[in-house]
Image (cartoon, rainbow, N blue to C red):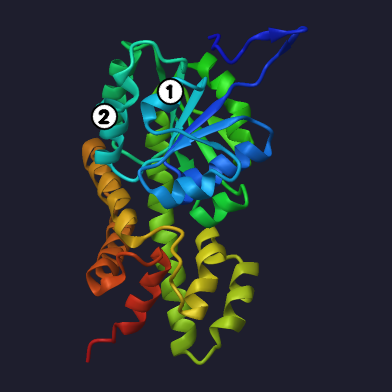
Amino acid sequence: MTTSGEQEAGGATSRPIVGVVGLGTMGGAMAQHVLAAGYEVVGHDVDPASEQRFAAGGTVAKSAAEVAGAVDVVILSLPSVAAFEDVVYGPQGLTATNAPRCRIVVETSTLPRELKQAAHGELSAHGLELLDCPISGTGAQMAVRDVVYYASGDERAIDVVEPVLQACGRGVFRLGALGNGTRLKLIANLLVTIHNASAAEALALARAGGIEPSDALPALVAGAGTSRMLEVRGPMMVAEEYEPATMKVRLFMKDVGIITAFAEEVGCTVPVFDAAGRLHQEALEAGFGEADAASVHAVVRRRRQPT
């Protein structure tokens, strides 16, 4: 696949101009990494504060359609199905123009697979190739490029965008047909849910058992029972400070619902995940919706052994 960003100049291929729609925790950090790598970046977000932060180095567009008209590759980083549908199908969305400059759309959000597959057909009719490339990693990890991408879809399109994604993380895994990226991301987030809950439980037991959590955490991280969630969210659990959130409980529960539906669809029981998911639901119901998912530690600590 050749995009308008692959113009030959003196035998070399020029870099694509990159768009980022959704400049929140993940998208904003991605945009900054791509800028730092020397790409020209155009961005858009419905939140003026997010656009203002991005404007220090990038070019702000008024809509997703305007982004598509100015770049070769658009990266989407969106929080919900409603946001995705507005960006794709809305009056100022990607399908609002019949002749966009853009040729490749990279969807990095955790959204239902069927939603992305339906959008692929609609975008194809407008000359846009949708790739399913969700991110595995938290907002804190994205800030330091400690994430990976699960890329699926057209291989030639992935060839074009892989250098851009490499600028934002530490690896791109090619997984074949469109939708496989989301399948593996859901499996990865199943583990995130379990490991987050287990980290919360382990540190709660340390507190209850008379071991200072600040002493327990480095020892546990160095031992056989470590996990990335213990490493990343353990410090928040030790401090019992759950803001600012790198992944809000409210948004995380969206992922839990999608994973549950996926497991039911394929007929696979996930009992450990189910228990961990209930713990995150308790955190939501306890008022931690806008706090980091590390707040499940507070939920575990509030529980008492039955008498």
**Pointer 1 local density, CA inside 10 Å: few below 14, some 14–19, many at least 20:** many
Of pointers 2 and 1, the one earlier in the residue sequence: 1
Q: Is residue 28 above or below residue 7?
A: below
Name the spot of residue 161 as percent of width and height, x first: 56, 24
Q: Which residue is mark 1?
A: 68
Examine the image and state in which quarter residue 80 appears: top left
Q: Hey, what amino acid is under mark 1?
A: Ala
Name the spot of residue 222 as percent of width and height, x first: 65, 68
**Pointer 2 local density, CA inside 10 Å: few below 14, some 14–19, many at least 20:** few
- Residue lying at 54% horizontally and 61% vertically, measured from the top left: 227
Q: Relative to residue 121, is residue 234 drawn left or right?
A: right
Name the spot of residue 34 as percent of width and height, x first: 61, 37
Residue 205 vs residue 254, the one in the foreground = 254
Examine the image and state in which quarter residue 301 appears: bottom left
Q: Is residue 227 above or below residue 268?
A: below
Q: Is residue 70 at all visible to an observer of this figure?
A: yes
Residue at the far right: name it. Answer: 10
Q: Hey, what amino acid is under mark 2?
A: Glu
- Please tell me whether mark 1 sits on a helix, a strand or a loop: helix
Q: Which residue is mark 2?
A: 114
- Please tell me whether mark 2 sits on a helix, a strand or a loop: helix
Residue 94 vs residue 229, the one in the foreground = 94
